[in-house]
Image (cartoon, grey):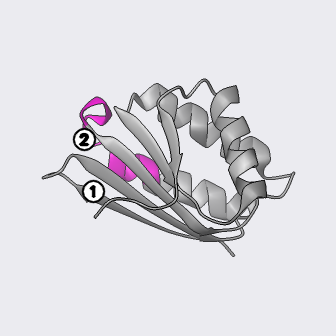
Amino acid sequence: MGKYVLKTDPENKKLHIYLEGTFSNEDGLRSIQAYQQVVNPIVPSEYELQIDCRKLNVTAPDVVPLLESCFVMFKSDGFQQVTLALENNPLLKMQLSRLGRKAGLESMLIVPSFQA
């Protein structure tokens, strides 16, 4: 089961998303609804999106289209920067990089961890 936590940091203009585990389509749909509720009251173009994927598992092929739609959503929301924290998982890094490119998310960076 996939877990997610969303936190807005208005002072530093950052939206933090923490992802963990293996997401099913149902988990993904719930996380998208939660994301939309958090994003609606802010102006994404003024924010950086930081997604912590260090405890996320590689996405199953049947869930990849849903993940790809998330990347398209991040692009259309217009965040200043989208940064993914990811370490020691080359398969997941390849998967997320490919999906980011496919969605046209030029502002995406993959880093080992976030700066404190």
- Decide whether residue 6 is among the magenta residues: no
Q: Where 75 falls versus 47 (above or below)? A: above
- State yes or no: discs 2 and 1 in contact (Cβ < 8 Å): yes
On screen, residue 26 versus residue 76, left or right, reads right
Q: Quadrant of the C terminus?
A: bottom left
Crowding around mark 2 (Cα neighbors within 10 Å: few <14, some 14 to 19, many 20+) is: some
Question: In terms of sequence position, does the residue under pointer 2 or pointer 1 come before the other?
Answer: 1
The residue where tag 2 is placed is 42
Magenta highlight range: 35-46
Q: CA distance from mark 2 to mark 1?
A: 9 Å
Residue 8, disc: 1
Residue located at (62% from left, 55% from top): 29
Residue 22: % across, % down: 72, 69
Query: In terms of secondary structure, where does tag 1 sit?
Result: strand
Residue 61: % across, % down: 87, 51
Q: Quadrant of residue 102?
A: top right
